[in-house]
Amino acid sequence: MQAYELMRAEKFGKATPLLEQVYRGVPVLTAQRPRALVINHAILDLVQRVNVMRAVRDLNDYLAVRDQPDELATNVLGSALDLAARSPRFASTPLFASAQNVWQRHNNILEASQPGSHLWGGKWLTPREYERLQAERLAADQRIADVQAVVEQLNVLIEQQHEYAAEYERQVTEYQHSEEDSPEAKWWYAARRGATARRKAAELTAGRDYDVKLLEYLKRTIIPRPTWPTRYAPVDPNA
C-alpha cells in the first residue's frame, strides 16, 4: 500500500524498491499474481524506462491467459510496446511479437465490448475521428505506393545505365589489347573489367539499401501513429 501511495505522489524512485520487494515476495507465476501488483509493477518499468521489456513480458504473461476486457492492462502493454519498438534489438525478439499478438487480441476484445467504437493509442475515438484517421491512413498508403513506384522505375533506369557502361568498358578494353599483349597488360585489362563489375554491384547494392531506408523513413513519418501515454494512474491494491 505504501508503494501505491508513493506512485500516486509520483515518487517513483522511492516506490520501486518497495514494490520490487512485494513482487519478489509473491512466489507464483506472473499470470497468477494480483492484477494491481502486475500493472503497478509494469507502470514503474514504463515510467522509468529501464526495464520496459520486463513490463512487456509481465503483461504479456498476465493477459495471455485472460479473455475478459481489461482496458488499463491492455493500454499499459500498448505503451510498453510502443517504447520497446524504438529499439530494433527489442522489436525483433519473439517476446515482442508474442506481446503484440496478445495486445491486439485484447484490443479487439475491448472494441467488441463497445460496438462501433475504436481504440487508438489507448484513447476511444468517436466515429468521426475514426473516419478521419482511416482517410489519413489511406492517403499515407497511397503516397508511399507512389514513391515506391517511382523508386522502382529509377532502379530500372539505373540498372540499364550500368549495363551500358559495363558494355562500353568491355568493348574499350577488348579493343585496346590483343593477343600480342604481354601477360601484365592482359592482367591489367582483366583487372579493370573486374573492378568495373565490382563497382557496379556495390553501387546497385547501395542504391537498394537507400531505397529500403527511404521507404522505412516514409512509413515512420507519414503513416499516422498513435501517441501512447507514458504515465498511468496506479491501481489501488485494495480496490
Image: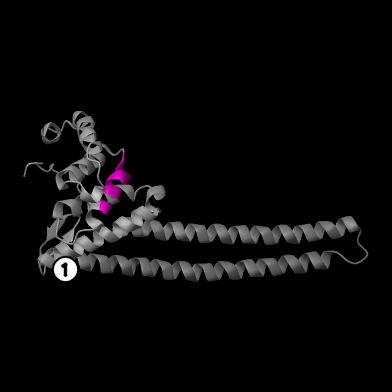
Between 35 and 48, the residue placed more toward the observer is 35
Which part of the image, by quadrant, shows the C terminus? top left
Give the camera-side residue of 149 and 25: 25
> Residue 134, percent across and down?
21, 67
Q: Position of residue 71 (x, y in %)?
A: 14, 55
Evaluate whether residue 123 shows in this view: yes
> Which percent across, then down, holds residue 15?
18, 31
Q: Which residues are magenta?
A: 51-61
Q: Residue 104: which quarter of the image?
A: bottom left
Residue 92: image quadrant is bottom left
Q: Residue at x 25, y 45 (%)?
A: 28
117 or 180: nearer the viewer: 117
Please, which residue is most extreme toward the front here? Answer: 27
Q: In the rendered view, how is the structure colored?
A: one colour
Residue occupied by mark 1: 131
Q: Amino acid at mark 1?
A: Glu
Q: Residues within 10 Å of mark 1 (few under 14, many from 20)?
A: few
- Say left or right for 77 vs 197: left
